[in-house]
Image (tube, rainbow, N blue to C red):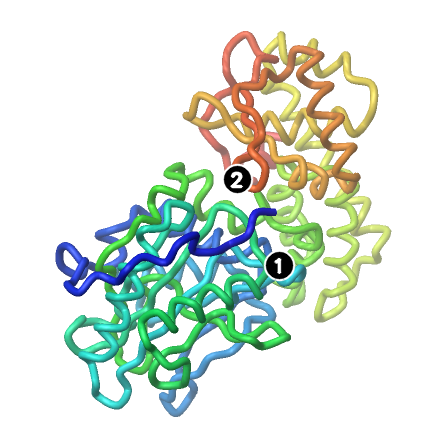
Amino acid sequence: MSALTLRALPTLLTDCVIVGHAKKADVVFTPPRWFAACVHMMNENPENFFLMAYRDKDGNPKFAKSYNVKVEERAAWAWDTITGKAKLPASIGFYPTNAKRQSRWAAMDFDSHDGDHARARDFAHKAFALLIREPQLYVALCTSAGDPEHSGFHLFIFAAEFFPVEEWTRLLKQVAAQIDAPIQPGVCEVFPDDCKGIGRAIRALGTYNFRSGDCGLVLHETLTKLLPASPKEGLCSLGTRSTARGDFKSLPSSAFKITAPGTRHAKLLELVGALFLQCSREVALKTAELQHAEASPSPVASLEEHLAEFDQAWAGMQRHWLRKLTPAERIKFDALITNNERETFRIIRNWSQTDDPDFKVHCESLAHRLGITLQGASNLRRRFCALGILRQTAAYVPHKLAARYVWIAAASRPNTKKRNYRELLDAA
């Protein structure tokens, strides 16, 4: 892994380098790109590993790590707050670390709680002038809340790949020293700091500030050069499309948890409908078992009855899905030998349903969905190319870009119109 460092610290500019006026995040970013920024800031952590900002019953701002809330739900609410569509405000923040103590982003917070707005603005502009010159880094300078003349500043620094948190901390200290900014609360704080645990989180770009009652603004950014523009790689990536191995197991504790009498069957159908195109039957079955075990109140139906209904619903989905295959796809599918091959066919065919000319086939994500090793997923992807199901269009770039493919199993591309789980189940 290459060292994360400013190769040669430039002389600081003496004038302001910010061009243009501060704008709300929804003016600077499209929704897919803002959600892609959230995906990037998640650092491949579990879907409940993020910060929630809210007001308590007395109206006081509170900040706490999420435990039961899913990140895509909170991010969508935070975006609705930015765009003025939310009935009640919400905000979201992220931790610059993960289980490997690595991050692909960092931040500096220049405060003006004592009223010295000029000091905060001066530090922020100088740090921005330093970091924007580094071609391997992508930056975004934002106000922490509202008017840039009466606010602190958040400076976000992004990289395409992961680096140890200690490297990020060292870099931020280096920048602070160059601009003569003391790292102390109320003046300049860095994320990540020297904490050995998960450390502190910082709110996402342009989100709602519960202390001031308004959203942060974006002054200048180069982040959009790094972020994907496709909606498929935006909000949906916060969910089961790109999350870690344990995420399927955590689904019953949130969206599909049985929390009321008489809802077990409906919740089971929701689970099957959501997972059929996303993971293997074996992974989905374990999720259904956990759904029954976590139900409160306990269902009247036994686990055996619950799983029998799972089998029935899954088989119905399978019959309908098979009818949707083109003749050419059905020939390819019927020639597959193992369950893993057939499950992979279903998952990757779903990934191929995009308006883009090609799509990513991420081996780690595929391995998680099948419950197999990374090498096993890589072997399946290679075999699909040999069988004429996939054709590679772009090679894997280590720590930066996943390999990309086109779906060639069909005489024509699959229908890109998505149908929800209820329509599929009814049709089955």
What residue is disc 1 on?
Answer: 46
Q: Residue at x 38, y 88 (%)?
A: 60
Q: Is residue 165 visible?
A: yes
Q: Position of residue 367 (x, y in %)?
A: 72, 39
Neighbour class for label 1 at 10 Å: few (<14), some, many (≥20)? many
Q: Position of residue 307 (x, y in %)?
A: 80, 48
What residue is disc 2 on?
Answer: 400
Up-down: is 379 above or below 279?
above
Q: Nearer the viewer, residue 4 or 194?
A: 4
For the residue marked with disc 2, what is the amino acid? Answer: Lys
**Residue 255 position by quadrant:** bottom right
| On-image quarter of the C terminus | top right
Q: Residue at x 39, y 92 (%)?
A: 58
Secondary structure of the residue carrying numbered label 2:
loop
Left or right of 285 in this view: 176: left
Up-down: is 113 above or below 267?
below
